[in-house]
Amino acid sequence: MSNGDIFVGEVIGTAILILFGAGVCAAVTLRHSKARAAGWVVIAFGWGFGVLAGAYTAAPLSGGQLNPAVTIGIAVDTGVWDKVWVYLLGQFVGAMLGALLTYLVYLAQFQANVRDEKSGEEPTPTLGIFSTIPEIRNPVANLITEIIATIALVLPILAFGLTKGLGESGTTVLIVSLLVVGIGLSLGGPTGYAINPTRDLGPRIVHTFLPIPNKGTSDWGYAWIPVAGPLIGGALAGVIYNVAF
């Protein structure tokens, strides 16, 4: 794969991932959305379908990694680092693009994020649409959660490569998508399961600059955890896979 193909594939695939993922969060969160208050299960499946659509789209060009934690895990296992920077750059650009597209899809709802004079309902904080927010703010616990959840993502992805039938049938991406849904349902409660540094950082940057009325804070004090945790988890998954398999 050429550097150009990898970059384009990761930009497109990650943009689709974020468009679906941030999109379902917007659908469930924003006032005047038909899916408002649909719940956590809907969010988990929305992110899973984002992985499905993004990874299958990017696969012919880049392999559809879409996540620096996955890229780092693969590099730690294989020892091949020369194209890592291309993957990470494409993923970062794609994540920001996906966040911007989500904003455009829900533009009217974002513009209506003001106090409802009839009901008295206050504006909705919007950061949770774009990035993760811990339910209980405890840096050590939050970091541990992200590390463990990312290992639970990357280690199975690496192991799936040993399952010949998955590769031959083309169902690897489908299985990974279901894995992401499972992580959301089982491990997402404490932090919102970033498990992907650019999935959190890129949209957080976009949120900072978007002209959303009453959007609330971008919470940069927490932003290092959903970056460091998944990177550590991805590297540890690569080490565990290399040693155990």
Image (spheres, grey):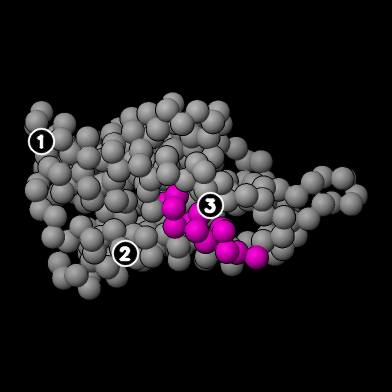
Please state which of residues 92 and 29 is positioned toward the viewer in this rendering: 92
Q: Amino acid at mark 1?
A: Asn
Residue drawn where x is 49% and y is 37% of the image: 192
Residue drawn where x is 37% and y is 48% of the image: 197
Is tag 3's residue or tag 1's residue first in the polypeptide sequence? Answer: 3
Q: Position of residue 51 (x, y in %)?
A: 37, 50
Which image quarter: residue 159? top left
Q: Secondary structure at mark 3?
A: helix
Taking the image as drawn, is residue 44 in sight? yes
Image-based side of 195 in relation to 3, left or right = right
In the rendered view, tell whether residue 155 sits above or below residue 141.
below
Helix, strand or loop for the magenta stretch, by majority: helix
Image-based side of 191 in relation to 235, left or right = right
Queried whether the magenta region covers residue 206, the answer comes back as yes
Q: Which residue is mark 2?
A: 90
Q: Which residue is mark 1?
A: 242
Q: Secondary structure at mark 2?
A: helix
Q: Amino acid at mark 3?
A: Phe
Q: Rounded to the nearest whole Å, what is the CA distance between mark 3 and mark 2? A: 18 Å
Is tag 1's residue or tag 2's residue first in the polypeptide sequence? Answer: 2
Q: Which residue is mark 3?
A: 130
Q: Position of residue 219 (x, y in %)?
A: 56, 46
Neighbours of disc 1 within 10 Å: few (<14), some (14-19), many (20+): some
